[in-house]
Image (tube, rainbow, N blue to C red):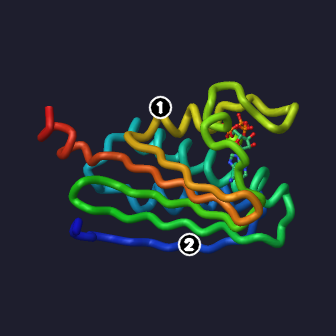
Amino acid sequence: MMQVKNQVKLEFSSIPENITLARVVVAAMLAGMDFTLPDLDDVKVAVSEAVSNAILHGYQNRPTGFVYLVFTVSPEGLEIVIEDYGRGIADIEKAMEPAFSTLPDRMGLGFVFMKSFMDLVEVDSQLGRGTRVRMFKYAFQTMQAVQ
Ligand SMILES: Nc1ncnc2c1ncn2[C@@H]1O[C@H](COP(=O)(O)OP(=O)(O)OP(=O)(O)O)[C@@H](O)[C@H]1O
Ligand SMILES: [Mg+2]
């Protein structure tokens, strides 16, 4: 069991305004920790992408859904879990391919950004039930230790 230093849980309506809320919360949490500024920017982009996916795809832009976010800081780094109880993903492997999107006006790059900016990205989803994205970023000192 990893030792938990700090854990923050957020539950918010599926409205685009809350993408900013999630970014601000993660930035505040990481301030003063062992993350570099570029790390912080990476995490903010990954959180934005996952939260916008929950709102746009999961809840198809309906404002009545809820997005659940859990940030867990441990000595190893930062774990972020983003969950929605929306539409779900039919084919996760395909959804994670670069430039794949089910919406014509989208680039299909959200998962590409998440994977390149975080050290680990796992997606669980069930059609009609929802989607859970778990991401991890190693703390700077942990990275140094394993090098
Ligand atoms: N939370 C979710 N619920 C349902 N479907 C999702 C969810 N997240 C992603 N998807 C599906 O996976 C596809 C790929 O997601 P990704 O974020 O990579 O691209 P996008 O959102 O389509 O485009 P972009 O992120 O570049 O605006 C989406 O088009 C959508 O079909
Ligand atoms: Mg996206």
Q: Is 32 positioned to the left or the right of 114 in the image? A: left
Residue visible at 77% across and 59% down in the picture: 87
Quarter of the image where ligand 2 sits: top right
Q: In what element is the residue under mark 1?
A: helix
Considering the image in quadrants, where does the C terminus appear? Answer: top left
Residue visible at 50% across and 73% down in the picture: 9
Residue 129 visible somewhere in the drawing: yes
User: Where residue 10 is drawn, which disc sits there?
Assistant: 2
Q: Nearer the viewer, mark 1 or mark 2?
A: 1
Instruction: State the residue lying farthest toward the top.
Output: 99
Q: Position of residue 4 (x, y in %)?
A: 27, 70
User: Where residue 116 is drawn, which disc sits there?
Assistant: 1
Q: Position of residue 141 (x, y in %)?
A: 18, 45
Neighbor class of circle 1 (other Cα within 10 Å; few <14, some 14-19, many 20+) is few
- Res 96 quadrant in image: top right
- Res 72 quadrant in image: bottom left
Residue 20 visible somewhere in the drawing: no
Measured in 3D between alpha carbons, the distance from the residue under mark 1 to the one under mark 2, in whole angstroms, is 24 Å
Residue type at tag 2: Leu
